[in-house]
């Protein structure tokens, strides 16, 4: 045999042997399997350091595996609450999976802005890569260029040709640069509404996946914001709207975890329940989750038993079979991360259960978004005239204190009168408000006094206020006699004049100024105390909170027969339409950054030219009542906080602010 023939035979035998070693099995790895095999969480990143495990929050596993390159799912949207571990358990794990297993995919991580994108890379993604043993894969695609390391501020490249671009949603030009297969959108609702003239940033980014249309992967993670403007809510409704069902530890029936529900027919309550003390504070350890079917009461720790037995159940038909969506509120958060008790505390800070009204609309939106994972709806943000007009009472007129009416509808006579002053250029708006037990409000008087408010000796303006404060007297229909207990003067305009006027009085007349934020060291959250240049006492009030409260009270109806809701507003029959319309002048609207159009919350707005003096005077009166109650309870009675039942009891039994008729 020739040597050439022997060489050919050896080569053929080598090829046959190698082919024989091949198998018909293809090994695949899901994102969740990669994470639990390779990922390590350092103590700097979590309170639960160590190897990553979906046992901490099992329902996240299914969502993460939608990003499996072999999965038929192309788009997945998660509308979520806070503290459920979604960014760690889904987005970050996806990056590690793409890098280690898929290798070749061009990818993009989209965040609200470039600064946040860099921070996410530096503080989370790069440490995750290092801790998970992936740093050796980082390599420039141009291997002949020895200066390139594969890691720049704009791009992270790795072996296999894949890369990750961290991009801020404001950078429209970058969103047009390259085709991508994996698009990972973090906190979608935090993106600006528009990027210049280019359009919606998430739409610009998603257009970059068209080159990989049949293999694209789009992940959207976000807590929602406001109804009708939430991007994640829009995409959630495009998907199959999956709900997480878990079993009851008592009866085994599967159900969706809800905050609290009441059966209107039977009155039965399920979901989260709790107890409060006499002051309305949550009783520690009282929070339970009540089963809808058997009434079994679960503790927060029972989530460790419930969550591993989860089922994701589709509840709608998606726009396409390859589009999925999930809703995952914070009620499912790992037991140690955001317990049910913390959720209830957040609710009680936002909502006044006893009076069935908001305490703080901003906190209420945060509760809906972060705890419930739901959009927040500003219902009826513009008060109608017909609504406020219904608060007029035929039983009394201006200048009268209607104690017979008050006793009948409020449970007590009027217990205190407060005056408030709104300073304008050329006149003063002045109101007198009476309060009964439960904070029910009666407008007693309302004037516009024209003159020259710049001059403290002007008889038609400040002179009238002096007469009201020093000698004004009101007689009720039951014979009780009232003087003004305190007067609060707005110092937002002509502050120096107001400070000098109030300095004429040692007690009882105070400057008041609206503030959007109250200092952290303030005695109470609603207002803060400060000194004027004349060394007098003045108060800064959180006006948005009081406007939320007043708006809720004015929206509430009353049947005219039963006891009024606490905080209800009443006006005399002689209150003019013009005056009542002033209560409707302001409405709440979304607040946007002027330069970016990004949502930054919402604000009270008054259209140009709209008159709102009576509205402002009411706000000052509500704040004034809180200030008086705080002074009596905390300063004089040395209580730890305002105790409203005790305040009203003292005002009534001691006749602190009026003389009882004989």
Image: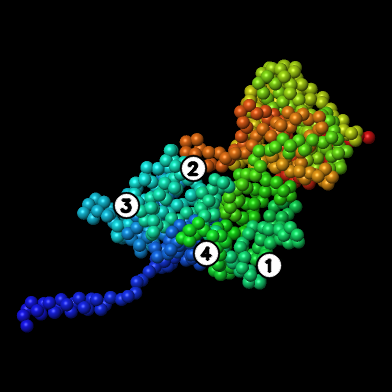
To which residue does mark 2 refer?
193
The quarter in which the N terminus is drawn is bottom left
Give the CA separation, mark 2 to mark 3: 31 Å
As displayed, is residue 154 above or below residue 482? Answer: below
Give the CA separation, mark 1 to mark 4: 23 Å
- Residue 126, located in which quarter of the rendered image? bottom left
Residue 200's x, y, as percent?
A: 46, 44
Say few, some or many: other residues with alpha carbon within 10 Å of mark 3 (under 14 / 14 to 19 / 20 or more): some
Between marks 1 and 3 in the image, the one whose residue lies nearer the viewer: 1
Between marks 2 and 4 in the image, the one whose residue lies nearer the viewer: 2
Residue 515's x, y, as percent?
A: 61, 35
Q: Is residue 26 left or right of residue 453?
A: left
Residue 576's x, y, as percent?
A: 77, 29
Contact between labelled residues 4 and 1, with CB atoms less than 8 Å apart: no
The mark that comes first in sequence, 2 or 3, is 3
**Residue found at x 52% / y 42%:** 599
Give the CA separation, mark 1 to mark 2: 43 Å
Contact between labelled residues 3 and 1, with CB atoms less than 8 Å apart: no
Contact between labelled residues 2 and 1, with CB atoms less than 8 Å apart: no
Give the CA separation, mark 1 to mark 3: 55 Å
Give the CA separation, mark 2 to mark 4: 31 Å
Residue 59's tag is 4
Say few, some or many: other residues with alpha carbon within 10 Å of mark 1 (under 14 / 14 to 19 / 20 or more): some
Work out which residue is located at the far right of the displayed protein and give it: 662
């Amino acid at each position: 045999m020739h040597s050439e023939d022997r060489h050919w035979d050896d080569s053929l035998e080598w090829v046959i042997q190698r082919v024989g070693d091949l198998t018909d099995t293809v090994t695949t790895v899901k994102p969740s399997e990669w994470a639990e095999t390779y990922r390590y969480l350092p103590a700097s990143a979590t309170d639960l350091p160590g190897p990553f495990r979906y046992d901490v929050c099992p329902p996240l596993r299914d969502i993460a595996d939608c990003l499996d390159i072999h999965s038929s799912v192309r788009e997945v949207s998660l509308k979520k609450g806070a503290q459920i571990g979604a960014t760690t358990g889904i987005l970050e794990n996806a990056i590690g999976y793409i890098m280690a297993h898929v290798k070749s995919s061009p990818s993009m991580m989209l965040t609200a802005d470039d600064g946040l994108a860099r921070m996410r890379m530096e503080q989370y993604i790069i440490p995750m890569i290092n801790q998970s043993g992936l740093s050796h894969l980082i390599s420039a695609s141009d291997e002949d260029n020895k200066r390139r390391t594969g890691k720049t501020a704009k791009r992270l490249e790795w072996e296999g040709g894949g890369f990750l671009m961290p991009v801020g949603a404001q950078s429209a030009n970058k969103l047009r640069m390259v085709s991508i297969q994996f698009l990972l959108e973090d906190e979608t609702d935090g993106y600006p509404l528009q990027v210049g003239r280019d359009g919606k940033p998430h739409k610009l980014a998603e257009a970059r996946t068209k080159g990989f249309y049949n293999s694209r992967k789009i992940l959207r993670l976000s807590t929602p914001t406001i109804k009708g403007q939430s991007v994640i809510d829009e995409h959630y409704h495009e998907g199959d709207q999956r709900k997480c069902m878990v079993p009851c530890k008592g009866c085994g029936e599967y159900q969706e975890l809800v905050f609290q529900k009441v059966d209107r027919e039977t009155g039965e309550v399920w979901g989260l329940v709790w107890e409060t003390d006499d002051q309305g504070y949550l009783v520690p350890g009282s929070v339970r989750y009540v089963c809808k079917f058997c009434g079994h009461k679960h503790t927060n720790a029972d989530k460790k038993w419930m969550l591993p037995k989860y089922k994701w159940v589709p509840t709608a038909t998606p726009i396409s079979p390859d589009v999925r969506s999930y809703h995952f509120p914070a009620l499912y958060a790992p037991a140690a991360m955001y317990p049910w008790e913390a959720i209830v505390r957040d609710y009680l800070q936002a909502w006044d259960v006893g009076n069935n009204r908001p305490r703080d609309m901003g906190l209420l939106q945060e509760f809906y978004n972060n705890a419930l994972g739901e959009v927040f709806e500003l219902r009826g943000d513009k008060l109608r005239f017909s609504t406020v007009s219904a608060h007029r009472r035929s039983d009394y007129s201006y200048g009268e204190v209607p104690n017979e009416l008050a006793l009948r509808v409020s449970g007590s006579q009027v217990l205190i009168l407060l005056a408030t002053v709104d300073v304008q250029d050329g006149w003063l708006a002045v109101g007198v408000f009476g309060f009964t037990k439960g904070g029910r409000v009666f407008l007693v008087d309302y004037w516009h006094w024209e003159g020259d408010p710049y001059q403290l000796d002007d008889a038609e303006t400040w002179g009238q206020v002096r007469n009201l404060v020093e000698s004004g007297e009101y007689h009720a229909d039951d014979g009780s006699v009232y003087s003004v207990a305190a007067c609060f003067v707005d110092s937002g305009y002509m502050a120096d004049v107001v400070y000098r006027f109030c300095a004429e009085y040692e007690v009882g007349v105070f400057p008041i100024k609206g503030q959007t934020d109250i200092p952290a060291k303030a005695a109470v959250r609603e207002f803060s105390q400060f000194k004027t240049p004349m060394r007098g006492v003045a108060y800064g009030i959180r006006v948005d909170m009081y406007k939320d409260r007043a708006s809720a009270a004015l929206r509430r109806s009353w049947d005219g027969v039963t006891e009024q809701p606490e905080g209800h507003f009443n006006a005399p029959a002689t209150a003019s339409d013009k005056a009542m319309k002033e209560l409707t002048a302001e409405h709440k609207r979304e607040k946007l950054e002027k330069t970016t159009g990004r949502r930054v919350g919402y604000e009270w707005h008054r259209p140009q030219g709209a008159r709102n003096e009576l509205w402002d005077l009411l706000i000052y009166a509500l704040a004034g009542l809180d200030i008086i109650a705080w002074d009596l309870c905390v300063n004089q009675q040395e209580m730890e906080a305002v105790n409203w039942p005790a305040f009203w009891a003292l005002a009534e039994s001691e006749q602190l602010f009026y003389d009882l008729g004989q």
